[in-house]
Image: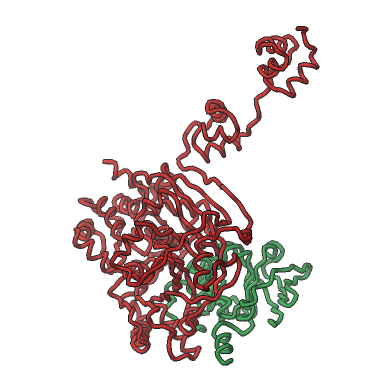
Amino acid sequence: MRFPKKEELLKLQAQYKTDKKIGQVLGVPAYLVAYWRRKKKIPKHSLPKYSFERVKELWETYGDDRKAGNELSISKAAFYKWRRKYNLLEKPKVLKLAQLEFSLPGSGRGKNRGLTIAQKGLALKVGKSGVQVGEIVYVEPDLAMSHDNAGLVIKQFREIGVSKVWNPDKIVIPLDHRAPAESEKTAEAHRSIRLFVKEQGIKNFYDIKEGICHQVVIEKGHILPGELAVGTDSHTTSYGCLGALSTGIGATEMAAVWATGNIWLRVPESLKLTLNGRLPLGVYAKDVILYIIGELSVEGANYKSVEFYGDTVENMSVSERFTLANLSMEMGGKFAIVPFDNVTKKYLKGRARRSYQPIYADENAIYENEYEYNISRLEPQVACPHNVDNVKSIDEIKGIKIDQVLLGSCTNGRIDDLEIAARLLKGKKVHPDTRMLVLPGSKSIYLEALKRGMIKTFLEANCVVLNPGCGPCLGAHEGLLAKGERCLATTNRNFKGRMGSTESEVYLASPATAAATAIRGEISDPRDFLKK
Amino acid sequence: MLKEIKGRVWKLGDNIDTDVIYPGKCLPILDPQEMAKHALEGYDKDFPDKIQKGDIILGGSNFGCGSSREQAATSLKFAGISCIIAKSFSRIFFRNAINQGLALVQSKEAYDLIKQGEVITIDYARGEIVTENERIPFPPLPEIVMGILEDGGLIEHLKKSLKK
């Protein structure tokens, strides 16, 4: 074998890169090629260049050398070398969302394309086998829910000039936002509602005694899987926890529904969210959905239907799924649906008083976007003022002094929420510079909490236990904030002025974080109390 | 057809939410004229006084996010706002505004091309926002939506169709 010329070697290197490959081509061992190279002062072929950004992104997406290496077609060890080079030594705490597929909206129009839950549900309502994304359909809802704002709905209904509502049995009205009436104006509204339901024969009216509208609707079986609900409250999306299509509308629109039994809806694009992994200690459905909102932004799901999948969701109770569907509104969701399964079935036993038909998406359904999250290393999350997508991990903000803690609302006022907070507060006191309000979500939750001693625990810890309702969550009454005050709440919105003064601040977190915060008087990590 | 809308522009930011537009504490109010006194008071306490009849709001993305309270749209309409232009609207606010007969224009480009205080014309027939130097096209609204808007809101629209 002759000694190759420098040009020849460079050419071979450009083509085959490594000494080993060059050796194979020339029929010589790699060390000989290396020897020639050194003689000709040719440096070793440089490793394929992976930028810091690329390596960082892969590391944050997978958190695993093998999987990340696969993406670059390099070994586990090689990927490790690269990330060590870039000083990416710590495992990512939460995995970055991997965008799995992207297809243009409306691309699900071909004949063989599968349908999403939203498409199927709306198609069923119009008696068709399928509807297209973007199409406008006229549908009759299975449920029309209103709360205290039924007062305004009635005013608008009278304006239309129809004497009877289309179907009194499909209308449900629980009073919860300002219950009991905080002002004369509200008292008048409540009175007009009480008179109206009698006049119209609306049986499903729940006076101030019953609880938060969405909770009452679910508990009393007013909405079932596969059905369609509209409600004069944005958090009507919550009924997706039972596999229903449900969404918020305004009072005038509700008046039109009462009058005609009809509403136009645009068939929405859908997002598929797959959540896998076991919830770590001190991390709950609230933390998961806050994290997702932080990633997708407050308009990440605007006009869209969100479908939830994955083992994390499958292992969640209806209460936890409720939290997911409820807060999906905060990223703009039109529907937020957890498909029907055995958990749903069990919950509905004894509640459903009519038959129902669950809806599932086709396997080849077309989503506008699909996201996958591994939540097994997620930390407690907090949404900071004044937007719900201003989400931070607990470590970043703990220590901020808090004047008021609020446990309750349609988002987190159920028995499992009260239970975890009671567990942390048992035998402890709320910090003397902080006050804590507890609002059970409904009468039945209140009774259950009473039976299990939680209410006693709250009172002994110096919490103020209020009647079931919305009250302070929307700044209506019962615990508003003064200028400069800060509240950590288990509720769903932290907009400027939401709970009182426009110069106050609201932080959103899980019931466990709320309890930990109440004990210390500053934003605290619930895991400090759970580890013992 | 909707007539041309001409007015002075109030330029606001992204994510102008319903609590900022209309505070929760005012929800029991039923009289629209009364509601108008609180329009955008969470954004600027004196805003209701600054608005002149016919003014136009120019918002960023996700305008009207949050609550389903239609008072957010009603209060702006009765305060004198003739139209809202935004990069994008939150779903429920969009419906509420249309149902109140408050004209909307969705335009991604307008925000950066129009200044605070500028007087502009919205030409629905041609689908254009006309400024001193610019003609900015915007996409048409769905037929059903235009129908409601042209009738002056959902109640009027419904009354008309019930008469037929």
Q: Is residue B9 above or below residue A375?
A: below
Taking A256 as reference, is A353 left or right? left
User: Residue at image x 23%, y 62%?
Assistant: A448
Asked which quadrant contains residue A450, the reply is bottom left
Residue A476 on image: x %, y %: 38, 71
Q: What colouring does the structure picture have?
A: by chain
Q: Is residue A253 above or below residue A77?
A: below
Taking A483 as reference, is A468 left or right? left
Q: Is residue A31 above or below residue B58?
A: above
Whether residue A221 appears in this view of the structure is: yes
Identify the colour of chain B in the image: green
Whether residue A505 appears in this view of the structure is: no
Quadrant of the frame with the N terminus of chain A: top right
In terms of depth relative to the viewer, which is nearer, A176 or A145? A145
Residue A530 on image: x %, y %: 29, 44
In terms of depth relative to the viewer, which is nearer, A410 or A121? A121
Asked which quadrant contains residue A290, the reply is bottom left
Residue A515 on image: x %, y %: 30, 53
Marks counted in the figure total 0
Asked which quadrant contains residue A286, the reply is bottom left
Quadrant of the frame with the C terminus of chain A: top left
Taking A528 as reference, is A503 left or right? right
Q: Is residue A260 above or below residue A388?
A: below
Identify the colour of chain A in the image: red
Residue B54 on image: x %, y %: 65, 79
